[in-house]
Amino acid sequence: MNQILLFPDDYISGNRAMLSGRRLSHLMSIVKIKTGDTLRAGLAGGMMGRALVLETCGDYAMLETSFDEPPPAALPLTLVMAMTRPKSFRKAIHYATAMGVKKIIILRTWRVEKSYFDSPVLDSDSLRMEMVLGLEQARDTVMPEIVVKKLFRPFVEDELPVLSEGTLKLTAHPVAESACPRDVKQPVTLVIGPEGGLIEYEVKLLEENGFTTVNMGQRILRVENAVAAIISRLY
């Protein structure tokens, strides 16, 4: 945890907040806070700054906050990611959030198991936790917007062209002939398939809608690793 992320319901009055639960446990056992310490902190969806530890005990810590720094700039990238195994999905959301992605679309493709969409990882509380962990890691305060789309063709034909207008349109695919570009200077819409990749029909449909198919080299990466690797390469 590189920054405490606070929420409006943490506040008891004015600029005083009370922490308990997971965040307190981390601060007490790992950071080993004590009264008088100053910590990095931020308000969810808002500014960042410092938190002075006014009081600590086994059940809570009282903080006095002062926010005067804007969060880091959002990454100019929209991530369209096929749903994957729950464990992999959690990591992918965490990594994308930490890297500054603010628009994530979860897509069902042919190789995605239908049961994945019944997983509790898509519950709002589970998604929120992974995003919080990513923001704490990266010292950010703005959570991504996550949208689930279960119908591939209608999304690609009807919604994706509007969503991706004015951006560099890329589909990550292991057997593509072109290499993924580096250090781009424009917004990007990036499509990443599931484990096993996109099928030929899906790749072709994306190409028909303006997407260039690119690879990351000879090695096949897990989805969560591909998310981090491709974003790092692009920006």
Image: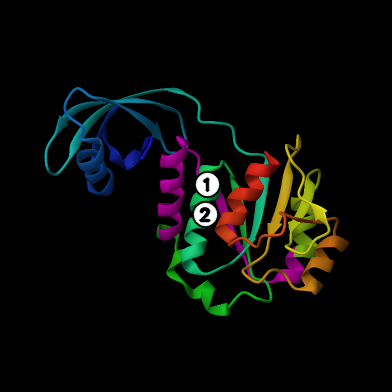
| Residue 191 or residue 163, whichever sits in front | 191
Magenta-colored stretch includes residue 99: no
| Residue extending furthest toward the left | 57
Please name the residue shown 16% across and 26% down the image.
35
Q: Give how far across and how far down residue 110 sits, in percent.
A: 69, 76
Amino acid type, mark 1: Thr
Residue 143: image location, x then y, percent: 50, 44
Callout 1 crowding tier (Cα within 10 Å): few <14, some 14–19, many ≥20? many
Q: Give the residue number, with chain letter if any, for mark 1.
A: 97
Magenta range is 126-155
Residue situated furthest right in the rendering: 208
- Front residue of 203/230: it is 230
Kindly state the secondary structure of the residue where label 1 is placed.
Answer: helix
Tag 2 residue? 93
Asked which quadrant contains residue 221, the reply is: bottom right
- Residue at left offset 61%, top offset 53%: 227
Image quadrant holding the C terminus, namely top right
